[in-house]
Image (cartoon, rainbow, N blue to C red):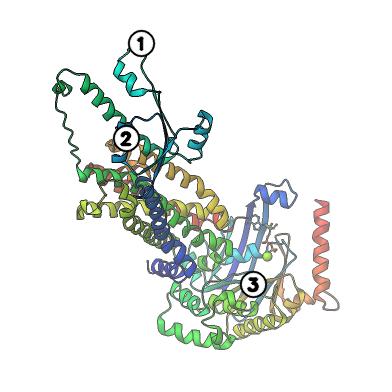
Amino acid sequence: MTDLEVKNIKKTFRLSRKQRRIEHTDERKRIAVKGLSFTARRGEIYGLLGPNGAGKTTTLRCISTLIRPDEGDIFIDGKSVLKESIEVRKNIAFLTTELKLDDFFTPNYLFDYFSKLHGIDEETMEKRKAEQFNRFGIDKFAEVKVADLSSGMKQKTSLAISLVHDPDFIIFDEPTNGLDVLTARTVIDYLLEMRDAGKAIIISTHILSVVEKMCDRVGIIIDGELKISDDLDKVKALDANGDLEEVFFRLMEESAGELAHA
Amino acid sequence: MRNMLVIFKKELFRVLTDKRLVLTVFILPGLSIFIIYTIIGTVVQTQFTEPEDYETKIYGENVPEAIVLAFDETMNYRFIEGGLTRDDLEEKLLEEEIDLAVIFAENFEERIAERDKQDLPDVTIYYNQGNQRSSSAHNRVSAVMRAYHESIIKDRLDDPADYHPYVLDTENIVDERSMAAQGFAMLLPMLIIIFLFVGAMSIGPDAIAGEKERGTIASLLVTPTKRRDIALGKVTSAALLSLLSALSAFIGIILSLPRLMVADEAMPDISIYGAREFLAIFLLLVVTVIFIVGLISIISAYAKTIKEASMLITPFYLIAMIIGIMNSFGADVNHNPLVHLLPIYGPINMLSGILLFDYSITNFFITIAANIGYTALFVFVLNKMFDSEKMMFSR
Ligand SMILES: Nc1ncnc2c1ncn2[C@@H]1O[C@H](COP(=O)(O)OP(=O)(O)O)[C@@H](O)[C@H]1O
Ligand SMILES: [Mg+2]
């Protein structure tokens, strides 16, 4: 059994009037993901690489059970996100750098709150809290309201809180987006550490260097379609000089060509 | 179920530890009612009681001696004798420099004595109804004139005893309890509905639309929490907080009643109601508050921002307020069982009925059941909404 298997998922959104106006389009529907399949495994970081609007966030939200694919299914340890969403949620974390915390609460309160929602017992919770707060240097700010934390500290708190239940699957949408270099470094190091600890990690990004730095496997997604999905080394090898950027832009051009022909 | 409690506690903690919210949700309703009522009470009181030492200013022309003597007996006044034109006089009345003018025809008493029916002497009284002091001077002067009138007629009768053809007694039999009940029935239901709404409006949108606006809802939805638990946790906590908020308003009302009612003879005394009425009122409050909170929660789950939620709630608030005001000035308690099925109107009508000791147990339970039914429906819909990506992640 594959640890995580995305099986031919499709997702269409109805565009609101407001959205049509903003994007200057008459389309009523947008096919955000067009039959996407790939697999991810424990002990590996899988990177979904693609330009803005390619369908990365949509795919990751489907994996995280926040939205449902119209067709296809996703299996996590064999459990369907469509049919066993509650079971799936017990063993996944969904993170984005946009993930906001309620300004009013302290890291300490939020850690307890999410631990309880995950049904974690008091003892385990306190032990894990001490570890994580120490790991990210949150201890000193444990009783400071989120509103008064620096943006770096907010991001670290968000990371600690999303992982209260120590899940096997970590899904992270654009993990370094908008972060200062130092915080980005902390996040990347932590994800690498988690991979080495045997977690399955799936990230999305539009930044090539992020993929090169941390991914074991990569899928290039353009316009809702996965153009390629393989080990990073094999994908790079598609270019004579082993340049990921070249491979990426060639695929972009091809897909633009297809569109022009269509 | 366990997660419902976790969410319930978090929402309570959120509000109860926020000084600003505690102030606006729990302190201000009671305090503002108390202050407003106290001010109204004080104003009403000063309107009805005239300071003892006020010197009424009366202008007069050709005033007979007998009348002057009667004035001396009935009021503290300063007399201004003649010398004004009609225009001056009217102006002075309007400017409240004089309170009343009384103009007798020349040789008034001699002409009365002549008894010439073709040529009756006039008396003209000028006063300004817009001036409280002028009105009260008018009442007194009129009384003096009536007495003067009676004494003249008595003199003309052969037998003064003829002046009293019958004996008139007036007795004011007032039932203090029912007067007090009327006072409560008029005031309370409207105020309670308004404050329940205001309380729920300051909590519901923040707890639900706020999570969408801040983007914190995704963190909650990705935990293994049943959507029903989220819906129930949010609704029950908002209901409890709104109830506390309404309670604050209620305490404000009770504390300020003595001040508000000084003007009236019979001061409503809350002790006319027994445990049974209080229990019934409490149950009604609970079901009404869960109805309102359920409604507001659904609107908040639909809205993308707190502001949008507040905007969408406003029309419902206005409708509820109009129903409340209509009840205050409306006629009798409605006993049609079907009417008790209506949201908002049903509970307000029942509340009036209880306050007036005029209600049936069957209708009471219809009201309670109907509201529980509506709320169950709301929670069901809310549960679906939390499960709907269109509602939670729409753009
Ligand atoms: N909730 C939504 N409603 C309507 N359209 C959406 C919604 N979410 C995403 N889309 C559209 O689907 C496409 C893919 O979006 P997204 O998955 O966010 O791309 P990415 O994360 O790769 O930038 C975009 O064209 C976007 O406008
Ligand atoms: Mg995205």
Name the foreground residue: A200 vs B189: B189
Q: Residue furthest top?
A: B118
Badges 2 and 1, same chain: yes
Chain under label 3?
A: A
Residue B262: x %, y % from top left: 31, 50
Q: Which secondary structure lies at badge 3? A: loop
Badges 2 and 3, same chain: no
How crowded pointer 1 is (Cα within 10 Å; few <14, some 14-19, many 20+) is rated as few
The residue that disc 3 covers is A97
Residue type indicated by callout 2:
Ala
Residue type indicated by callout 3:
Thr
The residue that disc 1 covers is B118
Residue A65: x %, y % from top left: 54, 64
Residue B57: x %, y % from top left: 42, 41
Q: Quadrant of residue B334?
A: top left
The residue that disc 2 covers is B331
Chain under label 1?
A: B
> In this rendering, would A144 be left or right of B294?
right
Mark 2 vs mark 3, CA separation in Å: 60 Å
Ligand 2 resides in the quarter of the picture at bottom right
Q: Is any part of residue B376 visible from this angle?
A: no
